Image: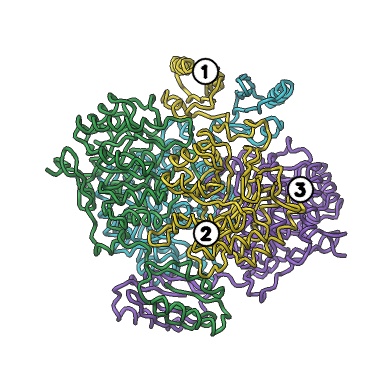
Chain colours: A purple, B cyan, C green, D yellow
Amino acid sequence: MIVVMKSGTPDAEITRVSDELGTWGLSPEKIVGQHKVVIGLVGDTADLDQERIQELSPWIELVLRVEQPFKRASREYRHGEPSDVIVQTPNGAVPFGEHHPLVFVAGPCSVENEAMIVETAVRVKAAGAQFLRGGAYKPRTSPYAFQGHGESALELLAAARDASGLGIITEVMDTADIEKIAEVADVLQVGARNMQNFSLLKKIGAQEKPVLLKRGMSATIEEWLMAAEYIMAAGNPNVILCERGVRTFDRQYARNTLDLSAIPVLRELTHLPIMIDPSHGTGRYQYVPAMAKAAIAAGADSLMIEVHPNPAKALSDGPQSLTPERFDRLMQELSVIGKAVERWPQPAPVLA
Amino acid sequence: MIVVMKSGTPDAEITRVSDELGTWGLSPEKIVGQHKVVIGLVGDTADLDQERIQELSPWIELVLRVEQPFKRASREYRHGEPSDVIVQTPNGAVPFGEHHPLVFVAGPCSVENEAMIVETAVRVKAAGAQFLRGGAYKPRTSPYAFQGHGESALELLAAARDASGLGIITEVMDTADIEKIAEVADVLQVGARNMQNFSLLKKIGAQEKPVLLKRGMSATIEEWLMAAEYIMAAGNPNVILCERGVRTFDRQYARNTLDLSAIPVLRELTHLPIMIDPSHGTGRYQYVPAMAKAAIAAGADSLMIEVHPNPAKALSDGPQSLTPERFDRLMQELSVIGKAVERWPQPAPVLA
Amino acid sequence: MIVVMKSGTPDAEITRVSDELGTWGLSPEKIVGQHKVVIGLVGDTADLDQERIQELSPWIELVLRVEQPFKRASREYRHGEPSDVIVQTPNGAVPFGEHHPLVFVAGPCSVENEAMIVETAVRVKAAGAQFLRGGAYKPRTSPYAFQGHGESALELLAAARDASGLGIITEVMDTADIEKIAEVADVLQVGARNMQNFSLLKKIGAQEKPVLLKRGMSATIEEWLMAAEYIMAAGNPNVILCERGVRTFDRQYARNTLDLSAIPVLRELTHLPIMIDPSHGTGRYQYVPAMAKAAIAAGADSLMIEVHPNPAKALSDGPQSLTPERFDRLMQELSVIGKAVERWPQPAPVLA
Amino acid sequence: MIVVMKSGTPDAEITRVSDELGTWGLSPEKIVGQHKVVIGLVGDTADLDQERIQELSPWIELVLRVEQPFKRASREYRHGEPSDVIVQTPNGAVPFGEHHPLVFVAGPCSVENEAMIVETAVRVKAAGAQFLRGGAYKPRTSPYAFQGHGESALELLAAARDASGLGIITEVMDTADIEKIAEVADVLQVGARNMQNFSLLKKIGAQEKPVLLKRGMSATIEEWLMAAEYIMAAGNPNVILCERGVRTFDRQYARNTLDLSAIPVLRELTHLPIMIDPSHGTGRYQYVPAMAKAAIAAGADSLMIEVHPNPAKALSDGPQSLTPERFDRLMQELSVIGKAVERWPQPAPVLA
């Protein structure tokens, strides 16, 4: 931490602030500039609250953090090595991570009935997916929109899991539901709207299933990593980060702005695996192929793509869903890029 | 709803879409333009999902909603009249609303100990506040920052309520805590980060205490009103809306951008009372007075202001807190504007 | 400036960077932290380019500016005192500034014909305005929209000036037009879209008429002050800053988000006078009164308000214009707030 | 266009509005809904100003544009076919467009001296670039930062053109400079800050050299295409669109957010060629390779990349520049993706 004092701060005040910070177990060192005095704080400052320092004195102009506020999520925490998040599925263990082949997650926005979810699972598996996504509990802007079939949809997901051997990823919206969802799901998803639902993060961090953490609609990269830190600090190291588009000033054509630069930025900052969701990220199925290819070229570890057997009849998110046929074609197209960057799963994407 | 068909859509497809919409209980009417055909949907479309229509046909260019998606929260729902949210406090009933005097809510970000919360309560009451705010459960970006004293802080709030007669407003972060918080609080707060925590909205809508709903950091006005609609649809009509700054590209000086234009916009759209929080809205105590005055001039019904007996020692949000002395002075300054717009509580702000 | 070296930087590299910075006329001072070394730069760093330092070494983690990058625009430049921008008008000199009464600028978006501009001038003067605004050259999103009457409109503005005695404010869009506009206008306006048209800023800074500098649609406060710095560095100290709404994620009801917190922020940072434009800031005439009142309460020095004798027939910006009758009423309403904050022009707003 | 009347609009007013619109050469058709009346406007509405309609009556709730506001820039204008922008260079004609190989533009932010610009030109040509970028006139946030060498730099660009045979792309900031820049440059660049400098757009549209139009920092896709429309309407059809990052709430790691979804969106809307600038788009050279690869995978027609022989000594934009060695390596990496998508220039990228 670096504390910048306002120009004209009395010497006595600078001494007082330094002394106070000394009592916090830090070693303050003073640099006297032409106009301003700066105090460098030597010691373990990662847990320090920037704002508490600022309020030590009205003469403090600003407090600058030099160390990153996240620890367990940081690349340094693993000495520069990426982590593998390995998920057990009926078809075997699937590893997510920088040194592993691409992992594909596909399926509908919400689970509608047994036939559609089983059919989708079988179809996306045939096309190369290792995981089925599908919402039992759906966050919807309107209370009058379809809210998901809830608990009964969990059984349908279990049936689809049995039928296809795919792993299941589904969203948790309420701390009260964690346990029953964890019985069925192989990966628990925290949605964008709940990225800073800290109660949920803590409780999901206290259970053992891997967690897919979507980026909040207007969350900074740092806030997102701090949300991961909540889960990891609660005991669960198996976090996968998923970029799904951020909110900007332009929502006329693409519904969100998919921030693919998050890939190289995260790669530098964290060891956690990175997933991209071009379906929510753009909001329109026509834009999904271009952005899926771009995500692979940029180095994503995994993709999540919405597929619905009949998007025109989908109970939610129809306009961004691909048909199974389009998904087949997309996987063919993606394989060209995936092979070029040597991340395509060959010949079988799952570990025994 | 208005459905715009792409230019070149075959007549048979237009007929098919019209017929399908007819089976949904709507009366579609066709306008044939020079390049495009437009279908107007007559009937009760408020519950209709725009996206489901869009996916009826790949020939649909766009679906435009003409009616607002919120009902209970709309101004029309009360035939243009504002609603009064009346809160019972030890000092009497306090009404929030357009035809009532300003209501002031003040207090610290978090409840730290009994002495500080009781002292703050007594001080802000003397200055003119009717409600004490104070967090027992605190949403913090970092898992390593102070998280609030939780349940034990609720008792301290109860003590401050007894000592001062002020109503209590405190935040609920987890559906599991609603009941115990509702025993102490007079108003339950949903924080910005939970504005689209739909599980929380539904459960808080199913209990009887009035609800303070903060606007999400990047929530549109419409999403915010839809969040209010969740609470109201669940049975609780007593919702107060609180603007607390939105996230924009510039966070260097003010931490958020306080969107005061929300006041005239909401006045037009909804009957619900409007509160402004200039403390979170700017993030710096120096900017609070200017924005508090502006809020009153723009027509706010209530203000929420952070006050801490010793901001330099505050466990959270110190930089945006006023000392009790500064709050006294601010209330003097605000009374000038409040009297000019004839909203100042005179002589006593509470009903018997 | 503060230079933070990456953890693990070799000592030799730290020495090399320090030595290099020493050759730039700075006195580098080193603080050795637990993980990182920080170099404080003592000396006149205001003109230093942050990025050039960053590139001295790949071991530099970040370069933090402690001093503000603007000088002439800074509050310190005038030792904490506000500046007065005094504009000569036919009716006398009108001062803009913190210690002066409010100044009102009113008029149509664009000059349409002599009758309408003269009528508007006479009407807004009667209501209390000291300046007439009106565009001869109009920045329009579409090349097919009305672009302003150009040079011939300047004569109409001159006629309105003669008829009313009001000062004239009009926009310059092209460096080639500065001279002829300066013959008629009392204040030259740089529009939001040209805030970083640096050629225009330099040339407008090289002439003598006062300049109204609108904030760019997504300009930070710092970029805006740097744009003012361009004008001032070119020799013209008479700059008035005008906030007119910034671009955010929500444009459904208000077209822009009027950032009133710019008022207290600018007051702290700069000595320049502050104007607010609630007409462009909201984009709808219904929201203008609330935001105009708020601007005065927050401490604005001046307001710019669109008035058109017949908004329904306006060639541009109709929806945000007030009729002269509504403007009369608005001025009555504003006087209540203006008097309360002791900024209302009494009895005559112009100096002899 | 579709005009939605407020609920409760008197019949006479609806008739009046319809009649008025009829006098504009349109055929209004009325749909009577349950709550509202909607008027569809049949006829050529592309040139119509949405806002002028809105102001016809206070009973108009909203006016919805169904047709796109751009014509010459629209995909329909060329019956769905992409356009080729063919640029003459000393090495031959280089076509930009969807059906052509990738075109690479590389070079420093600003032209510093003859040796560096010639060396850079020779190096980037050897690596596969067809164009040299380099600023003679530089838009800089601070008036105290290096502003470019101006006219004398144009001669240096001419020398680099002669030495390498590369085409030259350089920025125009002032209408007064167009002619002399057009003597040297093969493509004239309009920078992000001038995207809505309409005077510049009109004058650059009136000359013959192809134009590279960068997207404004917070310009919507529609505004960007309207800026292209200005150039095209002035007579110059040869416009290349360049995405260079938009401004969002998060600027901590990547300086801007590179909006790659602009690629599929533009492909759908316009026939114009699409260039991506990952250097400005991220602001850090480390992130350039990932985003350059992603851009190619997503379907970009061209890339602009900053290369400087010694970024540590660059007079501007050092942190985002690659060294020539890194650029060589990057081109190798890009060729893998470029070949996979069959857009890599083989064997020679220029036409005879």
> In front here: C279 or A219?
C279
User: x, y (%) of residue D144?
Assistant: 38, 62
Judge from the rendering whether residue A132 lies leftward or rightward of residue C281; answer left or right.
right
Q: Amino acid at mark 1?
A: Leu
Residue B172 visible in image: no
Q: Residues within 10 Å of mark 2 (few under 14, many from 20)?
A: many
Relative to A83, does residue B259 appear above or below in the rendering? Answer: above
**Lower position in the chain sequence, tag 2 or tag 1:** 1
Q: Amino acid at mark 3?
A: Gly
User: x, y (%) of residue C260?
Assistant: 36, 49
User: x, y (%) of residue A346?
Assistant: 85, 60
Report the chain holding disc 3.
Answer: A
Q: Amino acid at mark 2?
A: Cys
Relative to B19, does residue A213 appear above or below in the rendering? Answer: below
In the rendered image, which residue does mark 1 sit on? D26
| Badge nearest the viewer, 1 or 3 | 1
Q: Which mark is residue A129?
A: none
In the rendered image, which residue does mark 3 sit on? A107
Q: Residues within 10 Å of mark 1 (few under 14, many from 20)?
A: some
Where disc 2 sits, the SS reads loop
Where disc 1 sits, the SS reads loop
